[in-house]
Amino acid sequence: MPIEERRQSLAGKHIVLGVTGSIAAYKSADLIRRLQDSGAEVRVVMTRSACEFITPMTLQTLSGHPVAIDLLDADQESAMGHIKLARWADWIVIAPATADTLSRLVQGRADDLLTATCLASESPIALAPAMNNKMWSQAITQENLEKLIARGCYILGPESGEQACGETGLGRMLEPADLVSELIQLSLPAQLKGKKVLITAGPTYEAIDPVRFIGNRSSGKMGFALAKAAAEAGAQVYLISGPVNLVTPTNVERKDVETAEQMYDAVMEKSEYFDIFISTAAVADYKPENIAQQKIKKQTDEKIQLVLQRTQDIVATVAAKKIRPFVVGFAAETEQLEQHAKDKLQRKGLDMIAANKVGENLGFSRDENALHVFWKQGSQQFPLANKIVLARNLMTLIIKQFYAKNTVKTS
C-alpha cells in the first residue's frame, strides 16, 4: 500500500487502545505511532497490571493525551470518563489482550475502567491476544474466544513464535504493523460521508381488533445493525422501525411506526431525499379488511373468518419512482432461496437483494445470520456471523455497488 494511502486508511477514526498486563505491552508504544500514522486519534486506557510493564507517561507522551487508568478517579471521570470514552470511540482495540482480559469480557465484568468502557460501548472491539502457548490452547480460553466472536468481537492473531517464557508456540501478540493492517481491513471506510441512508426495520402489526393483530416475525436486529454500520460509514441515517425492543444506534434518527400503512407513509415522505434505501423490515403482506372497534369475544363457534387485503408494497414503490435512491431489499425464504430472491430482485426492480433462510432455528430473533446477496451482475455469500459483523460486511458491499452504479464514466 502506498505511504500516502496508508496514512489515510484510518483517517478521522477515534481509537481507544486498551493495554493490559502482558510483557507484550511494550509493543503498544509502537502501535500508537502506527495508528496515528494511519490517521487515527488514539486515547489509551491501561489496567493497573499493565503499568508494571510500561509506564503511563510513555504512552501519554506518544498519544498526546492523558492515560486513563482508574475507574473511580474523580479527575478522569470529570474529563473523559468511561461513558464519554465509550461514546467517543469508533474502535476499541485491546492490545495486548491477556487470557484474564478475555475471561473478564466474557463475564461482562465492569470493575475496572477498561472493561467498563467496553461494556458501555456500541463500538466494535478488536482483541490482540498475548499469552503463553499453553494458556492459549486451553479449552476454556478457546471457549471464551468463541463467545466473544459470537458477540461481534474481532480476534487479531495471535502468531506463533518464541515467547518471553522461553517456550515456542501460538500466543505471541501480532506485530503493530500487522495489527494496523488488520484493523484497516476491518474498518468500514467513511465513504458515505455526505450521503443519506433510509432504513426500515422490524415487523408491522395489523390490527384485528383493539387487542389482537397479525404480522410477520422480526426482531429488527439486522436493520438496527445496518443502521449502525451506515452511521459508522459516515452517512446521515434515518431509521423507520416497527414495534421492537431495541436501543437506537448512536448518530441515527429514528421514527417508530406500527402498521404497514404507517411505514409506507413514513418511507414515501422521506425516500426522494435519500441516496440509499435499505428495506429490512418484515412488512405484513396482508391486513384485515375490517378492524373490529371492540374486542371480539370468544364464540361457541370453533372458527372465525378474517377477510384480508393486500398492503402496499413499499420497496417496489420506491424502486419504481422516477427519481429514486439505490434500493436494497431483503428476502426471508424457507426454500429455493436463490430462485425466489432473484425473482424478487427482477420483479420489484431492485438494485440489490439480501436473502436468508428462515425457520428451523434460523434467522428470527437470533444474534447470528447468514446472507446470500444478489444484484444484476453478480452475487456474494456471507457465512453465518454475528449480525453486527454481517451488517458491516453487507454495508461494505452496498457502498461498492452504490458507487459502481452512480459513478459517471468520463473519457
Image (tube, rainbow, N blue to C red):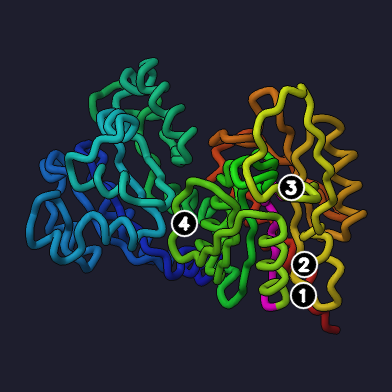
The one nearer the camera, 340 or 194, is 340
Nearer the observer: mark 2 or 4; the answer is 4
Determine whether 382 is above or below 320 in the image. Answer: above
Q: CA distance from mark 2 to mark 1?
A: 6 Å
Q: In the shown orientation, is residue 13 left or right of residue 400?
A: left
Q: In the shown orientation, is residue 9 left or right of residue 304?
A: left
Would residue 1 be seen by someone viewing this image from the given angle? no
Q: Earlier in the sequence, mark 2 or mark 4?
A: 4
Residue 28 located within the stretch drawn in magenta: no
Per the image, the residue denoted by label 4 is 248
Residue 64, percent from left and from top: 22, 68
Residue 333, located in which quarter of the rendered image?
Answer: top right
Q: Residue furthest left?
A: 74
> Mark 4 is on which residue type?
Thr
> Mark 1 is on which residue type?
Thr
Nearer the observer: mark 1 or 4; the answer is 4
Q: CA distance from mark 2 to mark 4?
A: 30 Å
Would residue 184 be seen by someone viewing this image from the given angle? yes
- Mark 2 packing: few (<14 Cα in 10 Å), some, or many (20+)? few
Quarter holding the N terminus is bottom right
Determine whether 171 is above or below 276 in the image. Answer: above
Residue 280 located within the stretch drawn in magenta: yes
Per the image, the residue denoted by label 1 is 407
> Mark 2 is on which residue type?
Ala
For image coordinates 13% across by 54% down, the residue present is: 56
Secondary element type, mark 1: loop
Q: CA distance from mark 2 to mark 3?
A: 32 Å
Q: Earlier in the sequence, mark 3 or mark 1?
A: 3
Which mark, residue 404? Answer: 2
Secondary element type, mark 4: loop
Magenta span covers which residues? 273-283
Per the image, the residue denoted by label 3 is 284
